[in-house]
Image (cartoon, rainbow, N blue to C red):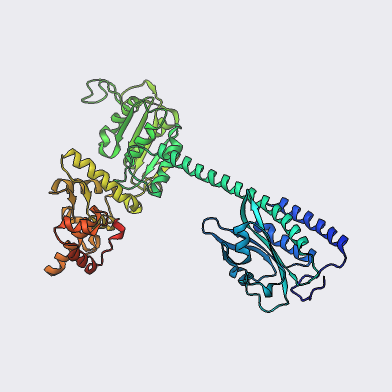
């Protein structure tokens, strides 16, 4: 069949029926090799369509796929179309030749595209010689997944059914690849879902029951607790005062094989230097004035379990060398004694000091630091885990409401804004004290800004000026009441109006005036 050749058009190979048959065999072999190479159609579609065009002199070979969710058909790959033309080739079910083939699942042949109203030419290929158009369905598991189509220069004597037969064979080969790709995607989806479920289960399983927080920063801490709990390694917990370092130490002990053994705490900063040695290592009777009886120290009491050395940075230099010996040899002598006592103790140290700086200053032994620094855990300050602030506040609200027998149920929106904008120098401990105070002074079942301590009643924390005229202050209070009512009624304006003792029309006017959007409360 003669074709009008151009630089962008394929050059058909000459020959009769035997030659065409040979080229078809070569083409099918090449398509098979391409599909065997990869199940990803995006990798093999372009060379496959190029081979179809070059071997059999077909123009604009196109592969379309159906999005089963949206019902839209788009061009996945093409040969002879520009990127802009391919982008325009989008169809709905039943629309044009492509849409009808996908809808009915049957091939369509347009002998002469210029005479067919069904041929839409959405790709806008512009003026060109008259062509014939062949489009066949790609069927995967009795469902039409897309189409394979191509143009051929119009020739009244051409046997277009041969093209239909060939394209149908290639479409069936593509269908197998589509089927396999779907199976792989479904398996990957199931694996992804299963992995996410397992990760969630593991995360929940290893989340200590005594710690509140779901932020990314705390998830790192939970993962570290899970990693180190089963081992006997020493742990150094670092973080600011009030971040919950002692809770982390509890979690390590009670998730370890030593959980049924003693968990002993020694607050080094609270112990005077004159008695800290006796507290840690014990003393013999008569070892010093007042030592009227033998006494076991914290290390002996913790035998088989764990010992928390809190504020380890405040330990005097004279005691540091003895701690180093216990960590290395697992043995010591009591004050005033000569008998060596061996212990099996897992040491957990905690500090709010910068130990490396103390080491450089000569205030903390370097060898002791590295003995403690086997597995460091950093507990982030509250200002770096703001996602946990409301969760912690709600936890403390329920705790102290129950302890004090008060029916305080929730925080107002303005209170949440103030909690989120405050810098929390005292960390979780300060937040707990703040909520405990608010519960004690609250009259109703909602915590309002005026229930919070004066430290939070600042322009920076509340986002509102400390001074202003009466109208502005009343307006701010009214806005807070409306937001609370919308929160209680899940954004229902009519219900909120009834709760506030007003009409929906008046409340709607005020909502508009205060620029409050009820939708987020729904």
Query: Which of the 4 image quadrants contains residue 367?
Result: top left
Does 370 sit left or right of 98 as displayed?
Answer: left
Nearest the viewer among 518 and 255 is 518
Q: Residue at x 71, y 72 (%)?
A: 112
Count of marks overlaid on the render? 0
Residue 330 at what x, y percent from top left?
42, 27
Query: Which of the 4 image quadrants contains residue 323?
Result: top left
Nearest the viewer among 479 and 493 is 493
Does 321 sit left or right of 486 as displayed?
Answer: right
Q: Residue at x 72, y 50 (%)?
A: 36
Residue 392 at what x, y percent from top left?
29, 46
Q: Residue at x 21, y 58 (%)?
A: 494
The quarter in which the N terminus is drawn is bottom right
User: Against 96, is 350 above or below?
Assistant: above
Does 201 sit left or right of 486 as displayed?
Answer: right
The quarter in which the C terminus is drawn is bottom left
Query: Which of the 4 image quadrants contains residue 16?
Result: bottom right
User: Against 70, is 399 above or below?
Assistant: above
One can see residue 66 in this view: yes
Q: Residue at x 41, y 47 (%)?
A: 356
One can see residue 319 in this view: no
Residue 510 at what x, y percent from top left?
20, 66
Nearest the viewer among 181 and 61 is 61
Nearest the viewer among 289 and 89 is 89
Residue 428 at what x, y percent from top left?
28, 47
Q: Residue furthest bottom?
A: 127
């Amino acid at each position: 069949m003669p074709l009008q050749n151009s630089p962008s058009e394929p050059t058909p190979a000459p020959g009769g029926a035997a030659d065409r048959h040979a080229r078809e065999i070569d083409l099918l072999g090449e398509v098979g090799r391409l599909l065997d190479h990869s199940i990803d159609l995006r990798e093999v579609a372009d060379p496959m369509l190029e081979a179809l065009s070059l071997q059999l002199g077909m123009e604009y070979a196109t592969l379309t796929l159906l999005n089963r969710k949206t019902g839209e058909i788009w061009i996945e790959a093409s040969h002879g179309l520009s990127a802009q033309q391919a982008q325009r080739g989008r169809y709905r079910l039943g629309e044009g030749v492509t849409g009808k083939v996908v809808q009915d699942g049957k091939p369509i042949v347009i002998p002469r595209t210029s005479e067919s109203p069904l041929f839409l030419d959405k790709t806008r290929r512009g003026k060109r010689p008259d062509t014939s158009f062949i489009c066949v369905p790609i069927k995967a598991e009795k469902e039409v997944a897309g189409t394979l189509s191509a143009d051929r220069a119009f020739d009244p004597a051409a046997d277009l059914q041969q093209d239909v037969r060939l394209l149908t064979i290639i479409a069936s080969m593509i269908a197998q690849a589509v089927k396999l790709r779907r199976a792989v995607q479904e398996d990957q989806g199931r694996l992804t879902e299963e992995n996410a479920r397992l990760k969630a289960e593991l995360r929940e399983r290893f989340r200590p029951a005594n710690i509140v927080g779901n932020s990314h920063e705390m998830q790192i801490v939970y993962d570290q607790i899970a990693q180190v709990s089963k081992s006997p390694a020493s742990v150094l917990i670092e973080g600011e005062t009030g971040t919950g370092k002692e809770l982390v130490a509890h979690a390590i002990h009670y998730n370890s094989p030593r959980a049924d053994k003693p968990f002993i705490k020694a607050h080094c900063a609270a112990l005077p230097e004159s008695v800290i040695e006796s507290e840690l290592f014990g003393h013999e009777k008569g070892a010093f004035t007042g030592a009227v009886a033998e006494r076991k120290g914290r290390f002996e009491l913790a035998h088989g379990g764990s010992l928390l050395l809190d504020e380890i940075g405040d330990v005097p230099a004279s005691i540091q060398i003895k701690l180093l010996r216990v960590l290395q040899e697992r043995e010591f002598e009591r004050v005033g004694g000569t008998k060596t006592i061996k212990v099996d103790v897992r040491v957990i140290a905690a500090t709010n000091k910068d130990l490396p700086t103390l080491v450089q200053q000569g205030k903390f032994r370097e060898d002791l630091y590295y003995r403690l620094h086997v597995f460091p855990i950093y507990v982030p300050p509250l200002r770096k885990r703001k996602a946990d602030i409301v969760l912690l506040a709600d936890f403390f609200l329920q705790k102290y409401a129950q302890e004090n027998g008060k029916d305080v149920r929730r925080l107002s929106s303005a209170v949440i804004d103030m909690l989120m904008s405050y810098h929390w120098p005292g960390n979780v401990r300060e937040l707990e004290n703040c909520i405990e105070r608010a519960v004690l002074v609250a009259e109703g079942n909602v915590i309002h800004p005026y229930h919070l301590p004066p430290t939070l009643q600042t322009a920076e924390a509340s986002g509102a000026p400390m001074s202003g005229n009466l109208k502005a202050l009343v307006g701010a209070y009214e806005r807070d009441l409306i937001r609370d009512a919308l929160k209680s009624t899940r954004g229902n304006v009519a219900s909120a109006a009834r709760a506030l003792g007003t009409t929906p029309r008046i409340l709607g006017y005020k909502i508009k005036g205060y620029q409050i959007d009820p939708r987020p409360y729904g």
